[in-house]
Image (cartoon, rainbow, N blue to C red):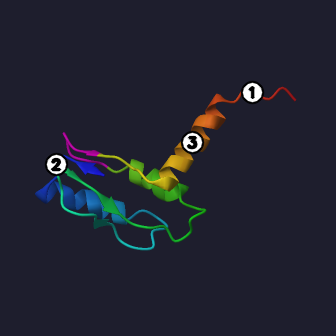
Amino acid sequence: MISNAQGASLGPITKQANEAPGLDEKFVPVGASKDGVIVIKAGFEDRNDFQPAIDHLRGIEVPDGASVQITGTPATEQDSITALVDRLPPRSW
């Protein structure tokens, strides 16, 4: 999901997104933009190996005032696992 990036500022964001490793297609818009927000989507070649793509997407450089949010089941899974591991007590054995 891309917020507050339109016209010339949107192209470089989608170009960077399409360079993510492990995509099985290029990102395409899902419907029209609304209130400065456009949703784009693409799939992964391997549903079990998406972390490099998520990491790449979260590292996209965006112009001032714009933002990119990475959503969807793979991102939610990665965030949930990370949150659980970060909160586990240290092993004592």
Q: Which residue was labeled with disc 3?
A: 80
25 lies left or right of 38: right
Residue stretch in magenta: 61-67
| Secondary structure of the residue carrying numbered label 3 | helix
Q: What residue type is labelled 3?
A: Ser
Nearest to the observer: residue 18 or residue 27:
27
Quadrant in which the C terminus is drawn: top right
Q: Which residue was labeled with disc 1?
A: 90
The alpha-carbon separation of the residues under discs 1 and 3 comes to 18 Å
The alpha-carbon separation of the residues under discs 2 and 1 comes to 44 Å
Q: Do the residues labelled 2 and 1 touch (CB within 8 Å)?
A: no
5 lies left or right of 44: left
Q: Residue at x 51, y 55 (%)?
A: 74
Q: Residue at x 57, y 42 (%)?
A: 80
Q: Residue 28: x, y in percent?
A: 29, 68
Q: What residue type is labelled 1?
A: Pro
Nearest to the eye among marks 1 and 3: give it. Answer: 3
Q: What residue type is labelled 2?
A: Gly
Quadrant for residue 65, please give it. top left
Q: Earlier in the sequence, mark 2 or mark 3?
A: 2
Q: Residue 13: x, y in percent?
A: 26, 56
Quadrant for residue 20, please give it. bottom left
Q: Which of marks 1 and 3 is nearer the N terminus?
A: 3
Q: Residues within 10 Å of mark 3 (few under 14, many from 20)?
A: few
Where residue 24 is drawn, which disc sits there?
none
| Secondary structure of the residue carrying numbered label 2 | loop
- What secondary structure do most residues of the magenta stretch adopt? loop
Q: Which residue is drawn at 62% across and 32% down?
A: 86
Q: How crowded is mark 1: few (under 14 residues within 10 Å), some or many (20 or more)?
A: few
Q: Which residue was labeled with disc 2?
A: 36
> Image height check: is 89 above or below 6?
above
Q: Residue 82: x, y in percent?
A: 59, 40
